[in-house]
Amino acid sequence: MAKTILVTGAAGFIGSHVSQALTGRGDRVVGLDNLDPYYDPAIKRRNLAEVRAALPTGASFTVVQGDIRNRELVEALFARQRFDAIVHLAGLASVRYSIGRAARYNDVNVGGSIHLLDAAIKQGETGKSPNFIFASTSSVYGDTERIPFLENDPCDRPLAPYPASKRAVELLGYASHNAHGLDFTALRFFTVYGPRNRPDMMAHMLLDSVTKGRELELFAGGQLKRDWTYVDDIVQGVVAAVDRRLGYQTINLGRGEPVLLADFVEIAEKLAGGRASVRNTARPAADVEATFANIDRARELLGYAPSTSVAEGMGRVWEWYRGVYGP
Ligand SMILES: NC(=O)c1ccc[n+]([C@@H]2O[C@H](COP(=O)([O-])OP(=O)(O)OC[C@H]3O[C@@H](n4cnc5c(N)ncnc54)[C@H](O)[C@@H]3O)[C@@H](O)[C@H]2O)c1
């Protein structure tokens, strides 16, 4: 049966893909996004236009331009309709940018999430509460020594305000589950890339560097490893989580096959037919040496099966990038 789903951050990279997948299968999606200027809001408007252009006949996709920090606005949304699920993707991302901005990350990522949790709990007082799906991050693991990363690890030493804010919401999710029976699933995304990716992320900056000669900082001589995960695989995991009430869960969504940064650079250079303009710098203290997801729990609970290799995924990013930004 078709569901009514609130997608926060619907105009963003992952949010636009999630909205497209949910409306594509017939769900009614209400998007909430304030078009935050962290990167060009015109990109977010374009994302929304692409979702609208792909809507099947009769599909329902409404977008509210508003801020999750606005408690009244969030309450008004829930007063207007009941939600079967919330996919909460809105927030400030970026580990490095968060350093020195703890108050802002707390306001948006923690404060805004509390408004949504409270509204979900309130809905549950007069019927069923929505299934709450939260976009968490692999960076909650900090400098963990266990490789691959396992959900049971303590995650109590985040290396920057961003992962601290995400971990705080996971903990508040547990408290909401315990005290109010809210179904809450935190999905820990591992470096997501794909068409529409954020311009501040490596996949995008690399192509900018090769095609436009923009200088790119390369940490530790490219010897870091990242578990790059293609956006369609992430979306598959998110949609599966929407459809399952799991009580309280934290689940890694990665590919489970880390790739050396230097190899990632080479893949992009081959695709774009040039060399990236690279400045080698030391690894910042907030960046870990490797990310690597153990995805057994995702396979078991969500039927998650990532299928896109980095070579294939970057090929699709390059096709998209060329179409939008020229050769
Ligand atoms: N991209 C990744 O690799 C990655 C990895 C781990 C976790 N995440 C998380 O997934 C989510 C989506 O990430 P993304 O890469 O699509 O980022 P994004 O910046 O493209 O999307 C986030 C969206 O949230 C909106 N937003 C920001 N503040 C808001 C506010 N106060 N009120 C309403 N909307 C607000 C932004 O306008 C943006 O459209 C984020 O929560 C991010 O922390 C992403």
Image (spheres, rainbow, N blue to C red):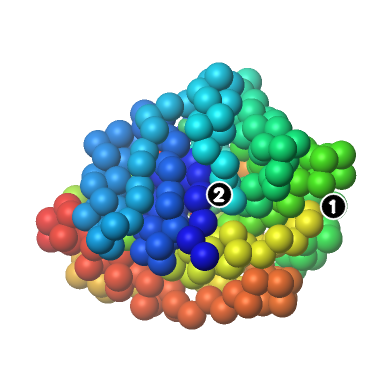
Q: Assess disc 1: are there few (<14), some (14-19) or many (≥20) residues with their C-alpha within 10 Å of its C-alpha.
A: few
The disc placed on residue 87 is 2
Q: Name which quarter of the figure residue 266 lies in.
A: bottom left
Q: Residue at left 36%, top 38%?
A: 63
Q: Name which quarter of the figure residue 291 lies in.
A: bottom right
Q: Residue at left 51%, top 44%?
A: 6
Q: Is residue 142 left or right of residue 303?
A: right
263 or 245: nearer the viewer: 245
Q: Gap in Å between the C-alphas at discs 2 and 1?
A: 25 Å
Q: Residue at left 56%, top 30%?
A: 79
Q: Is residue 49 left or right of residue 10?
A: left
Q: Is residue 42 left or right of residue 102?
A: left
Q: Which residue is mark 1?
A: 154
Is the CB–ligand 1 distance for label 2 below 8 Å? no
- Do labels 2 and 1 touch, CB within 8 Å? no
Callout 1: helix, strand or loop? loop
Q: Is residue 86 above or below residue 258?
A: above
63 or 279: nearer the viewer: 63
Image spot of residue 284 (x, y percent):
58, 43
Q: Is residue 118 left or right of residue 306?
A: right
Asked if residue 136 can be seen in this view, the reply is no
Asked if residue 82 can be seen in this view, the reply is yes
- Which amino acid, mark 1? Pro
Q: Is residue 93 above or below residue 242?
A: above
Q: Residue at left 26%, top 66%?
A: 318
